Image: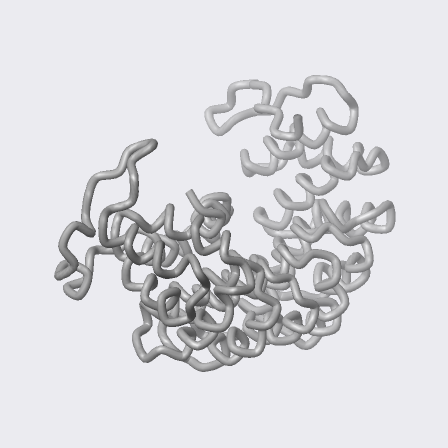
Amino acid sequence: MTRFLESHRRLPAGLRSILLVAAAFLIPAVSGAVQDIEGTLHTPFPGTPLSPAAQAAVDAARTGDPASIRALLPLFDTEDNERLVRFVVTLKDKAAPPLIGAVGDPSPRIAEVAAGLLGEIRAKQAVPALTEFLKSGRQRRYVAAWALGEIKNPESIPVLVSMLADPNESVVKASTRALINIGRKSTPAIVDALPSSSGRPRKAMLRALEDIEDNRAEDAILAVLDTEKEPVIQAAAARALSKCGTVKSYAPLERWLLEGNVGVRVECAWSLGILIAKPAEGALRKTLEHPDPNVREWSARALENITGDRVMYRDAKGKMVLPYNLYR
């Protein structure tokens, strides 16, 4: 399976809708145009050769001829797609010019496949075309964000941050994942944008910072934790501190463990456990008696990680039980 598909299979639950688009890239229904190519469709198994049509197209493209490379793109609607991706990757920079041209194709499918392949070959020269595609409002432009994340050019960071406010949810998810993939070089731009953000864009920024794991974001995230009125976003800030926080985060997390709503308390307990915040042990023992069983469970789990001892809590049925330890 290509990295394009696998990278989306590894997404957390909140991001899994992007799999629908990955499926459109690698496992779509066969188009009428491809059905007309005799011998294209076959059932592959390990070691199976390419279909005759695909093999002929590969042989023609092997020289790097731009027209022949572009002619491969409709064949990605067949069961040969995985092996075709691997072949295009072997062409490296020779494949870039025709693929860049195909990003502007009026067919959303052709543009999607071309953009995905440019990400696969890490074509830095494709950044302007991919950026234009991402900002265009065209169908399937999410894949441009994915490709920019694979190329990892820091010049792409501002547009990816701006796309976190896009109305298209798939674009937001792919841009979040791209910023995470680029890593700590993304942190300053996200931190700069965080104070003026709100709603879904703010939550996406916090999600990105959590996975980037950069302590430079701690102060900006703490500001969100202390001022955010929307509990879901405040909870996202609390969770992000599990990866971006230091001892400076202990007291604010302890405060909201005791004062926040249920979701915020759960995430504060999670982060305090991850950070092994020993000063918060007393507060966690208080929330071990909270009316909500989720707060009790996560408080017990955090205490186990902090103390090294097993800690029982009262479950929803009133039975004293041990939590599953998710930290180890």
Where is residue 13 shown, x and y percent of the image?
46, 46
Residue drawn at 69 percent across, 45 percent down = 268
Residue drawn at 16 percent across, 59 percent down = 37
User: Who is closer to the viewer here, 286 or 324?
Assistant: 324
The C terminus lies in which quarter of the figure?
Answer: top right
Quarter assignment of residue 325: top right
Name the image colouring: one colour
Where is residue 32 shown, x and y percent of the image?
14, 64
Left or right placement of residue 266 versus residue 319 in this view: right
Q: How many marks?
A: 0
Where is residue 29 shown, x and y percent of the image?
21, 55
Residue 169 lies, with reference to residue 129, above or below; the image says above
Quarter assignment of residue 140: bottom left
Left or right placement of residue 174 versus residue 211 in this view: left
Residue 15 lies, with reference to residue 71, above or below; the image says above
The N terminus lies in which quarter of the figure?
Answer: top left
User: Who is closer to the viewer here, 180 or 245?
Assistant: 180
Residue drawn at 37 percent across, 71 percent down = 67
Residue 101 lies, with reference to residue 302, above or below; the image says below
User: Who is closer to the viewer here, 316 or 222?
Assistant: 222
Residue drawn at 50 percent across, 44 percent down = 10
Where is residue 254 shown, x and y percent of the image?
77, 45
